[in-house]
């Protein structure tokens, strides 16, 4: 078998929520006055692939800016993380960014955590192939809920949470997640986290309304995902993608706008849609450095270092746990 196609041994932990909870979440969201669906439903296999394409779009500055910062400051970041820690990554996706730190950090165990099972397994196996010395424990988990982590033994624990995925949580939920991370890393652990900065609305809106229409496909794919998982009959052709910056809330809002009156059936329930009505599929909050320091302090983290690019588009924070 060619080396590139060989399966490489990884440990696998299924911490995934049961399928019924997806049905409940969809029903709850579609029964609300302002209909909404949770953004984690973007990430089936197709959605994860589309997100990878988004990260390479010319308009979508966060990924390349964050990668630039990781490349430029990897040595300093590694020094702060320390050698041989247990390194957990929330929302690891294709595990691309961690590659920029692995050699310098030499973690004892690397734990990629993601909701998209097959994507997680495929990318973990590629990583195990490319870093044969690395112990990879892939954990399929919906980290937007609380979860129980297997015990990885004594030592220092660090969490890497890149991509500004923290911005996809409502501020109270972001605080709850950071508190859970604080518990996970213990008193001497740390958090290296990428956070998108507040900026001109035009830059933000073009990042979420790309000319090639990939973000539009990504948004509409959520309906296809729900059709497949729950036997629903959404017609994506009855919806249009919309993304706008809400300056009052400091967030990009992604919506699916209904283009005609119709009805959707899921699990014996009928949901009425009116022309012009929207389903709110995602918020992407943007934080100033001071705002993020305030949030993380409430969760029990002290700021140690923050890196930003010259245009102040994106930030990476290293935070250490406080008592
Ligand atoms: C994963 N997350 C940080 C992305 C964001 O920018 O909020 C998701 C995304 N939605 C549309 N484009 C990218």
Image (cartoon, rainbow, N blue to C red):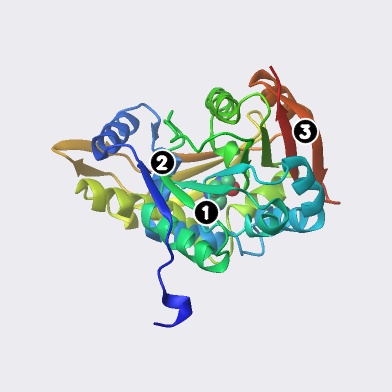
Query: Dividing the picture into quarters, in which one does residue 134 lie?
Result: bottom right
At 44% from the left edge and 52% from the top edge, which residue is drawn?
219
Q: Secondary structure at mark 1?
A: loop
Depth check: give the residue in front, 289 or 255.
289
- The residue furthest right is 310
Q: How many other residues sit within 10 Å of disc 1, few (<14), some (14-19) or many (≥20)?
A: some
* First reached walking from the N terminus: tag 3 or tag 2: 2
At 73% from the left edge and 32% from the top edge, which residue is drawn?
319
Ligand 1 within 8 Å of the CB at mark 1: no
Residue 48 shows up from this direction? yes
Give how far across and how far down residue 19 sits, in percent.
26, 40
Q: Secondary structure at mark 2?
A: strand
Residue 284 shows up from this direction? no
Per the rendering, the mark at residue 141 is 2
Q: How many other residues sit within 10 Å of disc 2, few (<14), some (14-19) or many (≥20)?
A: many
Q: Secondary structure at mark 3?
A: helix
At 25% from the left edge and 53% from the top edge, which residue is drawn?
228
Give how far across and how far down residue 27 sits, in percent.
27, 33
For the residues marked 1 and 3, what is the alpha-carbon distance in whole angstroms? 34 Å
For the residues marked 1 and 2, what is the alpha-carbon distance in whole angstroms? 19 Å
* First reached walking from the N terminus: tag 1 or tag 3: 1
* Label 1 sits on residue: 135
Per the rendering, the mark at residue 289 is 3
**Pointers 1 and 2 in contact (C-beta within 8 Å):** no
Q: Is residue 289 above or below residue 242?
A: above
Depth check: give the residue in front, 183 or 298.
183
- The residue furthest front is 154
Q: How many other residues sit within 10 Å of disc 3, few (<14), some (14-19) or many (≥20)?
A: some
Depth check: give the residue in front, 174 or 31.
174
Ligand 1 within 8 Å of the CB at mark 3: no
- Image quarter in which the N terminus is found: bottom left
């Amino acid at each position: 078998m060619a080396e590139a196609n060989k399966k490489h041994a990884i440990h696998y932990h299924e911490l995934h929520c049961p399928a019924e909870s997806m049905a409940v979440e969809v029903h709850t969201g579609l029964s609300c006055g302002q209909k909404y669906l949770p953004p984690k439903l973007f990430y089936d296999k197709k959605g994860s692939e589309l997100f990878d394409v988004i990260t390479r779009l010319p308009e979508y500055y966060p990924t390349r800016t964050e990668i630039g910062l990781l490349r430029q400051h990897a040595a300093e970041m590694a020094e702060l993380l320390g050698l041989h820690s247990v390194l957990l990554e929330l929302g690891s996706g294709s595990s691309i960014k961690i590659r920029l730190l692995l050699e310098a950090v030499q973690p004892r165990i690397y734990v990629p955590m993601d909701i998209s099972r097959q994507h997680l397994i495929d990318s973990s196996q590629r990583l195990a192939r490319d870093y044969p010395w690395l112990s990879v424990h892939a954990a399929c988990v919906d980290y937007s809920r609380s979860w129980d982590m297997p015990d990885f033994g004594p030592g220092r624990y660090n969490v890497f949470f890149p991509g500004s995925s923290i911005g996809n949580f409502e501020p109270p939920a972001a605080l709850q997640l950071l508190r859970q991370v604080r518990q996970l890393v213990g008193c001497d652990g740390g958090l290296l986290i990428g956070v998108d900065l507040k900026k001109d609305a035009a830059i933000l809106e073009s990042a979420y309304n790309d000319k090639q229409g990939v973000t539009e496909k990504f948004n509409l794919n959520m309906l296809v995902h729900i059709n497949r998982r729950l036997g629903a009959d959404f017609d994506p052709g009855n919806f249009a993608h919309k993304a706008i910056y809400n300056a009052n809330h400091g967030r990009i809002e992604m919506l699916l706008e209904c283009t005609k009156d119709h009805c959707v059936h899921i699990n014996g329930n009928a949901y009425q849609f009116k022309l012009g009505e929207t389903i709110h599929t995602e918020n992407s909050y943007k934080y100033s450095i001071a705002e993020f320091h305030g949030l993380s302090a409430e969760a029990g983290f002290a700021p140690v270092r923050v890196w930003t690019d010259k245009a102040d588009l994106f930030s990476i924070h290293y935070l250490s746990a406080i008592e």
